[in-house]
Amino acid sequence: MVAVVAAALIGIQGLSAPNASAVIPLIPSFVQVVAHQDDDLLFMNPDVSGGIKAGVDTTTIYLTAGEGGEKTYSLDYVRDRQAGVRAAYARMAGLTDDNECRRDQAGPGGCWTLTERSMSGGIAEEFTLDTWTGLKLVFLNLPEASHTDDLVTLAEVENGWPPAIKTLDMDGDPNSGAWPHEYTRSSLVGFTSALLYWYGATTVRAQDSAPDMQLSVPGKWHGDHEAHVAASRLADEAVRDYGRVANERVLLEHYRDYNIEVMPPNLAQPERDEKDDIFAEYRPHDSVTGGTYGTEWTGAEYSRAPRGTKWVARDGNMLLHAFVVTGGGLFEWFQDNALNWQGPYAHGDNGWALDAGLSLHNNADGRMEVFLRRRDTGEIVTRFQSAGGGWGWGELGSPNEVSGPWANSPSLRVSSPVVSSNADGRLQVFVRNAGGGISTRWQAAPNGSWNGWTDMLGSDVQGPPEVVKTYNGRMELFAPTRGRVLHWYQPAPNAPFVSDANFPNITAASGLSTGLNASGRIELTYRRPNDAHTMTLYQAQPDGGWLGPGDFSPGADAHGGVGEPAMVTSHGRMVAAIRNRGGGVSFSRQAAPDQPFGAWTDRGGLLVGVPAAGLDRDGNIVMLSISPSGLLYVSGERADGSFSSWTSHG
């Protein structure tokens, strides 16, 4: 018997005024913070190249010199790797040959201009593309290994000891000049935060601060590189500081690193070819890797903490609310009684570092509750409406131990939560636990306290599961692994879950989404490995067996892109919205209730994460996306089924 444990409640507060505290203008600006000169090319593409194609100012900050782990290092090798990323970024900016200028070089005859950028107690080498000054590469040149001269490494200083780290001697004179430069951990975070301010960052991309240690990659430290983890954790702190003082709307996105090698390939062939062509510009400059190095990662790009599609929902008055986590905390937009969008309103973060993924649901009495994950501990927390109209914070803890130094706490492998309600109104939350299975908590009574965590078993689950409430009040749960999808279901409303050993054998190269047909049949949607086609597995009848999988666009353009679809049913027909290869939104609609989906329509735009969709008070679809500048973009369904132009809010 599971003991009843009440979630800790932490005060009740009102909302702040609409956000007006961004010191910098909300003009889109991507900034990547990575450890090495190839991390962005291998693990953050095609997102980086997509932003450059869209004309968004883009800066990449390389924390280490990438000098390698040999006993001795060569500055020539460091300079070669810098030249490699200059060549790769020049190609992404449209310079496909050296006829106009040397794409890998700075100075006379080269495509780049070098500036030594000093501020806030730090120094960096900044390379700016001459044909587009909004494209910059910034090198701090910190050591990634100790070598024979016992240099302090990035991982060591991030871990807290030794207390200071020196850069490599980039000017060749240890007794004069700006190099080497020394940082403490706090001054390194401060300098990185100052660079985010200098480059006007509105979306920051970082690496994996807590790699999944169940994903085994031969020869890699816990399936990753210690400098990747250190760079991500330092970037997290820099973004938090930057969000407090300059731009609380800054978005923070995390990417998996080496372990995408053992994940299902999720890029369509055109995106994979382009990613490989870009890396091919870098590869000849790296004498240590060379050869075919990199091809094990050019077929995939995976978010480490996906935002998901569950960030919009209706309140008790059938008005839509959208919640987004930024570097400054949780923000909310909502429809007023005239169906106009208001906000954003700042909920803060209660002193916690919040992950991007969240899930919304109403309590039995209509009060909204937002379920989130703490990035610093992995614990699940909530932001809930009180009966008096204010908002409070609650804690649901973690199914796993919150302990361990550095990035080793088991709880850090817990996923963002998903939530639904039982037939009697009791909320139930589900997460992927540190063991790779599923854990759940549920309210002991509608609107009441919470039972403790229960292990539903399972293994190799990747990311958050997906839960759907059926036409008759039961819940069904789906979880993607690398080789199949796991399925649990309630045999009756409010009943315990049962594992389905006979669920069809499918592999998803994305998260999962569900929708309900007009007849009540469930459709499970996902991306197929290798070509990114959107697929559907569907019930033959309500509560019945499963048919498929079926391709949304057999023999036609599937619009590429990554991430799961957002699913919504309007006037009896389901609509799926995806992030497409251009970084915008495409949608497909059923031709008629309970019928196959039609061709994809590109709605344009440029978003962070994946789109969301909901129904307004009149039953019309509203598509939503978050722009790189942190603005909410909305497109509403018209009476004829078409959609309005995107409008920005906040």
Image (cartoon, rainbow, N blue to C red):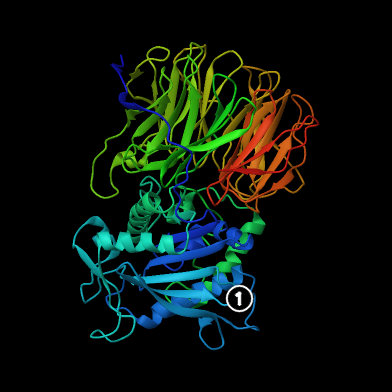
Residue 82 image-quadrant placement: bottom left
Which quadrant holds the N terminus?
Answer: top left
Count of labels in the image: 1
Q: Position of residue 605 (x, y in %)?
A: 66, 49
The residue positioned 64% from the left and 75% from the top of the image is 96
Q: Position of residue 353 (x, y in %)?
A: 35, 43
Residue at image mark 1: 131
Q: Can you see residue 286?
A: no
Residue closest to the far right:
640
Mark 1 secondary-structure assignment: loop
Name the residue nearer the viewer: 608 or 42: 608
Residue 123 image-quadrant placement: bottom left
Name the residue nearer the viewer: 291 or 512: 512
The residue positioned 33% from the left and 56% from the top of the image is 234
Residue closest to the far bottom:
108
Name the residue nearer the viewer: 600 or 295: 600
Name the residue nearer the viewer: 269 or 51: 51
Residue closest to the far left:
162
Q: Is 300 on the left-hand or right-hand side of 64?
A: right
Q: Position of residue 60 (x, y in %)?
A: 47, 65
383 versus 90 height, above or below: above
63 versus 572 height, above or below: below
Q: Can you see residue 97?
A: yes
Look at label 1 and name its amino acid. Answer: Thr
Which quadrant holds the C terminus?
Answer: top right
Q: Position of residue 504 (x, y in %)?
A: 59, 30
Q: Is 523 on the left-hand or right-hand side of 174?
A: right
